[in-house]
């Protein structure tokens, strides 16, 4: 944290010059610069493989997908594609790209750029975490698994420079929602080929002076553990309506320090606020604090391939021992709502049946049935955490105490840096994991986590009944029957407890009065066409 504060001091000097009493925000306002506290140091800036919502904010400034969500988060609107058509049978999507779209190096953005980027997402050597988003496309799943090696047999086609066609195996009404996500932001493949190749994860092409992007901004500077700086992309098709000259994203480990930086005029925006300060801001600075209900769910992932968590009775015991109401009251206050379902009610019109509850007696009975009466003989578990922020530790410590009090089970907390955390998840070298995920607005996204070999299946679940039920639900055309089928998947997860939901997030965002064009967004998206700062 000391290094990051020093970097902030350097920025003060850089922005304010001789105006010693001018805050960072005041100096940035004069120069059209937005300063954002962004929690995590990015692991990389490769949109096709990104796994972090904090990195998504940076990527949204640099890259543009075919479509994105409207400012109110309610509808899909054009982005890299000016328009599109969907065939009557729902099996063919045709996108028409903007003829004036260019990369930050001035080269035209073509349909082949999108096609090759999509193929990279499902390339087995890249192993993109969200490759399954394209499984409705002809040949995509077979290409990822190696059963198909000819990319020309995948239903992603570029018949000409400005037309992209997706051919589907079955109707997937959620397809446009998935195309708003990071994996479907195109990358400039000539750059990748010149710096290690398109079939590797990340690489030297992500660095300042090398990275080429198609969004409203371009990468100007990336100082590790200090900030990422992006500047206006003069070649962007809508550059005339981008009013910010520059954006700086600061990694901030400590939410208390982040709030102090906001109060001291060092940040325009923060995405975290300590629980104890929410009421104070709401009462004294209501115009600065925004409490936004999010689709994000925080949950436990259990490594079901390793004993004792391979026994569903153990997983059920650990979940039943959690008093979610008490957890939210102790660790989050207004920043969370207890989760009795995996998918947040209302997501894509879904109203799942509540199934997760607190029941101490049932928890103890399940643990005893698994061979650990009163917790005797139960091995110490390791609980992997992303970082050491106040909320993360408060949640973990509350869970640790509940498991001890209810089950006589001891859990060792293991906080780790974000990059280490990602590697632990990817390598499956954890026992219990505290995770959070912000899905696109459809139950498909989260419930796919239980499908065998799905890239997001961190639990390692392997259940043919779940796989078959998911496939049936996903291909059900009737909306009411589809949601009913998804509720059956919620029931299967509640029975097996691959994932135990804890709470849904209400995000407290602090926004300085000098920020204009700000809109609270349920998905956390930023509209770079509307944002600006006012001196």
Image (spheres, rainbow, N blue to C red):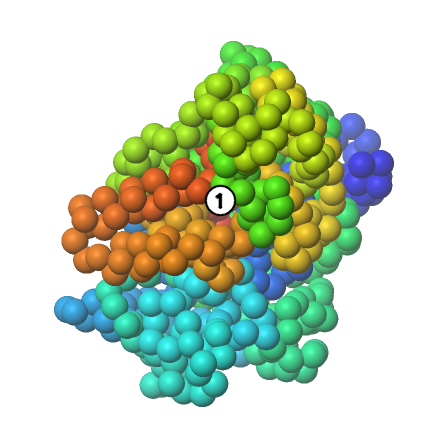
- Residue drawn at (45%, 87%) of the image: 150
In the image, taking residue 118 as reference, residue 12 lies left or right, namely right
In the rendered image of this protein, does residue 182 appear above or below residue 257? below
- Residue drawn at (59%, 75%) of the image: 125
Q: Nearer the viewer, residue 227 or 129?
A: 129
Q: Nearer the viewer, residue 258 or 530?
A: 258
In the image, taking residue 311 as reference, residue 7 lies left or right, namely right
In the rendered image of this protein, does residue 386 appear above or below residue 211? above
- Residue drawn at (44%, 42%) of the image: 496
In the rendered image of this protein, does residue 461 appear above or below residue 258? below
Residue 64 image position (x, y, % from top left)? 47, 62
In the image, taking residue 225 as reference, residue 517 lies left or right, namely left
Q: Nearer the viewer, residue 345 or 363?
A: 363
The reply to whether residue 275 is in sight is no
Find residue 19 and report its image quarter.
top right
Badge 1 marks a residue whose secondary structure is loop
Q: Mark 1 points at which residue?
A: 498
Circle 1 crowding by C-alpha within 10 Å: few under 14, some 14–19, many from 20: many
In the image, taking residue 11 as reference, residue 108 lies left or right, namely left
- Residue drawn at (64%, 54%) of the image: 428
Q: Quadrant of the C terminus?
A: top right
Residue 508 image position (x, y, % from top left)? 53, 28
Residue 75 image position (x, y, % from top left)? 30, 49
Q: Which of 257 and 434 is in front in this view?
A: 434
Q: Quadrant of the N terminus?
A: top right
């Amino acid at each position: 944290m000391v290094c990051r504060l020093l970097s902030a001091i350097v920025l003060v000097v850089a922005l304010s010059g001789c105006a010693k009493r001018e805050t960072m925000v005041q100096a940035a306002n004069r120069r059209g610069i937005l300063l954002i506290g962004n929690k995590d140091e990015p692991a990389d800036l490769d949109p096709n493989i990104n796994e972090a919502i904090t990195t998504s904010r940076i990527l949204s400034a640099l890259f543009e997908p075919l479509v994105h969500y409207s400012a109110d988060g309610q509808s899909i609107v054009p982005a890299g594609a000016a328009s599109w058509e969907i065939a009557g049978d729902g099996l063919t999507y045709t996108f028409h790209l903007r003829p004036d779209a260019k990369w930050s190096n001035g080269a035209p953005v073509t349909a082949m750029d999108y096609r090759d980027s999509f193929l990279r997402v499902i390339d087995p050597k890249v192993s993109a975490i969200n490759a399954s988003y394209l499984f409705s496309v002809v040949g995509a799943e077979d290409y990822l698994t190696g059963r198909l090696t000819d990319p020309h047999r995948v239903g992603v086609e570029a018949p000409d420079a400005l037309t992209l066609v997706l051919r589907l195996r079955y109707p997937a009404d959620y397809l446009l929602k998935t195309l708003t996500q990071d994996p479907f932001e195109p990358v400039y493949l000539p750059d990748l080929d010149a710096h290690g190749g398109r079939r590797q994860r990340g690489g030297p092409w992500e660095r300042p002076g090398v990275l080429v992007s198609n969004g409203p901004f371009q990468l100007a500077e990336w100082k590790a553990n200090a900030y990422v700086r992006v500047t206006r992309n003069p070649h962007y098709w809508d550059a005339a309506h981008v009013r910010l000259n520059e954006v700086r994203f600061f990694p901030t480990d400590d939410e208390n320090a982040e709030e102090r930086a906001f109060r001291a005029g060092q940040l325009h925006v923060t995405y975290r606020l300590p629980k104890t300060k929410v009421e104070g801001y709401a009462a004294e600075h209501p115009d600065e604090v925004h409490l936004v209900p999010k689709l994000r769910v925080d949950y436990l992932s259990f490594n079901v391939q390793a004993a004792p968590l391979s026994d569903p009775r153990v997983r059920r015991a650990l979940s039943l021992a959690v008093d979610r109401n008490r957890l939210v009251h102790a660790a989050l206050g207004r920043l969370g709502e207890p989760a009795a379902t995996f998918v947040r009610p209302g997501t894509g019109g879904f109203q799942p049946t509540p199934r997760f509850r607190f029941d101490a007696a049932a928890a103890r009975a399940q643990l005893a049935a698994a061979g650990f009466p009163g917790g005797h003989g139960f091995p110490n578990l390791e609980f992997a955490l992303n970082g050491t922020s106040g909320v993360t530790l408060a949640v973990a410590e509350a869970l640790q105490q509940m498991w001890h009090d209810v089950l006589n089970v001891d859990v060792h907390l293991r906080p780790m840096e974000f990059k280490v955390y990602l590697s632990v998840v990817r390598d499956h070298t954890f026992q219990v994991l505290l995770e959070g995920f912000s899905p696109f607005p459809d139950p498909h996204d989260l419930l796919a986590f239980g499908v065998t070999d799905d890239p997001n299946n961190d639990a390692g679940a392997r259940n043919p009944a779940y796989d078959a039920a998911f496939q049936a639900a996903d291909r059900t055309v009737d909306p009411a029957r589809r949601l009913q089928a998804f509720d059956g998947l919620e029931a299967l997860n509640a029975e097996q407890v691959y994932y135990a939901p804890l709470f849904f997030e209400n995000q407290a965002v602090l926004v300085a009065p000098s920020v204009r064009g700000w809109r609270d967004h349920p998905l956390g998206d930023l509209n770079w066409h509307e944002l600006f700062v006012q001196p």
